[in-house]
Amino acid sequence: LLGDSVDPHNGKCVRSSAGSVFHLPIVRERSITDGLNRIRAAGITTLATAADGELSLDDAGEVLARPTAWLLGNEAHGLSDEVLIAADHRVSIPIRGRAESINIAAAAAICLYESARVQNR
């Protein structure tokens, strides 16, 4: 969790994750730049969600097979330009039908599911 993020162990996060927060490695870094540098130093590819991403999630299998960190912004403002530029790839989630967008929880679930599916986890 980079920047000024919510405490992952507060009551709402624990309830909404159905306790999964206790079974996942969580790293917190107040400085977004330092956090992204730590991720890169660990050999992890950064993927930023973006409506106009150059890589469709449907075509991201090769990238998702490697260790990745998803970068998701908040619903009101999305990711900053700084983070979008710093990411290794900007990934769009194909939306079929008439919806214009999806909320952050749905976007996170879709991206994490696809990562797990590709990595057979």
Image (cartoon, helix red, strand yellow):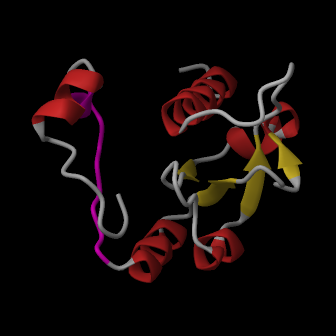
Q: Quadrant of residue 98?
A: top right
User: Would you say 39 lies left or right of 61 here?
Assistant: left
**Residue closest to the eye, 56 or 76:** 76
User: Would you say 116 lies left or right of 97 here?
Assistant: left
Vertical relation: 3 (above or below) 17:
below
Predominant SS of the magenta segment:
loop
Vertical relation: 109 (above or below) 26:
above
Residue at the spot 83% in from the left edge and 32% down from the top edge: 94
Across and down, in percent, residue 29 comes to 30, 70
Question: How many labels, in total?
Answer: 0
Q: Quadrant of residue 116?
A: top right
Q: Quadrant of residue 13?
A: top left
Vertical relation: 7 (above or below) 24:
below
Q: Say which quadrant the N terminus sits in.
A: bottom left
Please give the range of residues in magenta.
20-30
Across and down, in percent, residue 60 comes to 81, 40
Vertical relation: 6 (above or below) 110:
below
Magenta-drawn stretch contains 108 = no
**Residue closest to the eye, 58 or 64:** 58
Residue at the spot 42% in from the left edge and 75% down from the top edge: 32
Across and down, in percent, residue 55 comes to 85, 49
Residue at the spot 18% in from the left edge and 51% down from the top edge: 7
User: Would you say 66 lies left or right of 16 here?
Assistant: right
Magenta-drawn stretch contains 27 = yes
